[in-house]
Amino acid sequence: MSRRSGSAPATTGEVLHLIRTGEAATRADIGRLTGLSRPAVALRVADLMDRGLVAEDTAGPSTGGRPPVRLAFNAAGGTVLVASLGASRTQIAVCDLSGAQLARTDLEIDVERGPGVVLPLIMDVWADLLGDRPAAGVRGAGLGVPATVEFAAGRTESARVMASWTGVAIPPLVAARYPVPVFVDNDVNVIAMGEHRAAYAREVRDLLFVKVSTRIGAGVVAGGEVLRGALGAAGEIGHIPVRDGGGVLCRCGNVDCVDSVASGTAILRDLRAAGRQVATLADVVTLVRAGDAETMAVVRRAGRLLGEVVASAVNLLNPAVVVLGGDVAERFQPLVSGVREVVHRRSTALSTRSLRIERSRLGEDAGIIGCALMVTDHILAPDTIDATPAREPAHH
């Protein structure tokens, strides 16, 4: 963080940012970077220590004489509650302030049962996962949901698989039990954020994440930030139609949407129509590993159909990397190969010159990481810290 010339003195929130990013490790570093006087630095650091956000570490290196007291962000200074909801499986966790998982449970939940059933269940699981950790230490909560979300209000506007959730403002329902800031975003936006920040941030700033699971959706990271669009609907690629889809009616009412011809649901449907006894994707995995030609053909065709839509997105967005995640993409290399083949054939030469198409590096952890980052990015932002009253000073 560079100081603005002629600006007001660095705030407590800005000092925390310097410590969190590692730009400042001592009080002297803070003074040098901000121009604050020693008493002003001491005041801000004491405030952050009283809030439990900064701790002292006296084990730092010394150049002789008394070693400098080093400062570190205290990730253990609070907890964050997170839940990444999918169409069939929900990941629920308690994380520290760095986003590291402290406790986690994955549940098979039918989200169609509605918020009145699903949210209390998630909150009960949070209570179990917190265990002996004080509820007073919870500093925020974040949820990713398979729906278009008006981010500022945390309200679901259009649900892909959760019709009973449409129009629901989720934060007040959660805050009634856990009175902390609550953030909600589209599930694939959250996953894209987690994947980018935890696995790609040092390499690229423009990433397209495509989730291929029960349904198909995408999250766009542009210039290092999630691109949500005017109404939160950016990335809804599942309802873009493809050529030669076979005339499949989609649940949205249109025909041959990529969601209806290339998702996990579509693969299972097509294999059953071909006479294969498949109840779940695990059964499909077994057939792929056995080298079953019909199964391989169905999976590869799904990849090529998905590749048509991804090729158009690549031409439009020019990402540095396309990450394919979700149960289907992570299990089936033939699908990834099909996507790669079509994208390189159908996208412009410039947009694919250095394009990488890869499977997710984080796998199922991406949603949890993204939810935690969504919360900590807001609650630890300088403006938020400065707007939050300090706790009563600790007596040393």
Image: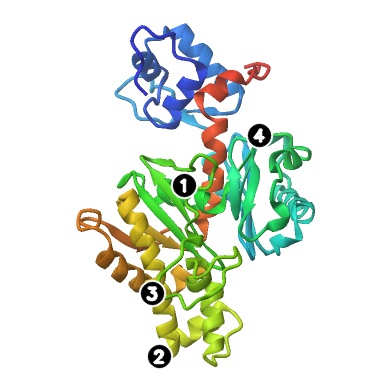
Please tell me whether mark 4 sits on a helix, a strand or a loop: loop
The residue at which mark 4 appears reads as 181
**Relative image position of residue 20 (x, y in whole percent):** 45, 31
Horizontal side of residue 124 vs 292, given as left or right: right
Check disc 3 and report the residue beneath it.
333
| Looking at the image, residue 367 lies above or below residue 286 | above
In the image, residue 204 sits, relative to residue 326, either above or below, namely above
Q: Quadrant of residue 231?
A: top right
Q: Residue under circle 2?
A: 293
Pointer 3 or 1: first along the chain: 1
Q: Which residue does the numbered mark 1 point to in the structure image?
A: 193
Residue mark closest to the camera, 2 vs 3: 2
Question: Mark 2: few, some, or many residues within 10 Å (few <14, many ≥20)?
Answer: few
Are there few (<14), some (14-19), or many (20+) residues within 10 Å of tag 3?
Answer: some
Q: Quadrant of residue 337?
A: bottom left
Label whose residue precedes the other's in the sequence (1 or 2): 1
SS at mark 2?
helix
**How far, Cα to Cα, is label 1 from label 4?**
19 Å
The image position of residue 51, as x and y in percent, is 61, 24
Please identify the quadrant where the N terminus is shown.
Answer: top left
User: Residue placed farthest to the bottom in the image?
Assistant: 275
Q: Earlier in the sequence, mark 2 or mark 3?
A: 2
Question: What amino acid is labelled 1 in the image?
Answer: Met
**Marked residue nearer the N-terminal end (2 or 4):** 4
Residue type of the residue flagged with mark 3 = Gln
> Which residue occupies 60% across, 19% down?
387
Q: CA distance from mark 1 to mark 2?
A: 37 Å
Q: Judging from the image, what secondary structure is the residue with disc 1 in?
A: helix
- For the residues labelled 3 and 1, the Cα–Cα distance comes to 23 Å
Separation (CA) of disc 2 from disc 4: 51 Å
